[in-house]
Image (cartoon, rainbow, N blue to C red):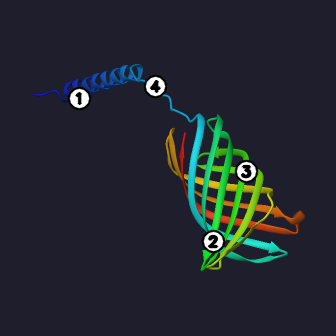
Amino acid sequence: MINKTRILSALGAAVVLVLAGAGQAAAQDDDQMIVVEKEERGGLALGVELGGGHMQCEGEGCDGVTEAGEVSLNAGVLLTPHFAIMADGSLMAHREDRLTLTHGMATIGPQLWIGPFWVRGGVGVARASFNYDAGIVDVGDKTETVPAAMAALGLEVISTPDFALDVRLRGGTGFFNDGDTQVQNVSLGLGANWY
């Protein structure tokens, strides 16, 4: 007759041995684990953005909102993996029939990454212009170069240490004619950045 107590004792001892062996193997695996450090961004940053939005002019000689396309270039240096000083140049343009309106800005300022989001601000200069193609002759004018400010917010949808693709919202304004006239722009765009 088979002794049930002996069988249960033998099975219990086998289970204890198997668990002890598995624990020892796991401990050995932990000792052999290789630690891989996450590579972080550094050095120079270069980027380009294409977008669309609108330009708004308020004050003497202009009044209204027009849709516009936008292109911007930026370059800077990362002082830490999450903080950079960036130079930014942008141009918004609207073309309708024979009339072309443009608003260009060049700014410099900080950019800060908070997880997948980033924020950028800058101060610099702006200039607006219009050109009307009258057929035989072109009529156009440019403003003086005036102080400007810009702010942007982005979300990186693809993010690696060397490249990022982001969706960004940006806005800027130029201060014309001693503050009586302002040309503002807002755009939503897609940006590609290399680090």
Quadrant (top left, top right, bottom left, bottom right) of the C terminus = top right
Q: Foreground: 138 or 149?
A: 138
Please tell me in which quadrant of the rendered image residue 90 appears. Answer: bottom right
Q: Furthest residue to the front? A: 136
For residue 94, the mark is 2
Q: CA distance from mark 2 to mark 1?
A: 86 Å
The residue that disc 1 covers is 8
Residue 41, given in percent of the width and then of the height, sits at 56, 36
Q: CA distance from mark 2 to mark 4?
A: 53 Å
Identify the residue shown where x is 73% and y is 72%. 56
In the rendered view, does 98 fall on the left or right side of 140? left
Q: Furthest residue to the left? A: 1
Element at label 4: loop
For residue 107, the mark is 3
Q: Amino acid at mark 2?
A: His
Identify the residue shown where x is 70% and y is 66%. 185
Element at label 3: strand
Give above or below for 151 relative to 95.
above
Give whichever of discs 2 and 4 has the lower sequence position.
Answer: 4
The residue that disc 4 covers is 35
Q: Nearer the viewer, mark 3 or mark 4?
A: 3
Give whichever of discs 2 and 1 has the lower sequence position.
Answer: 1
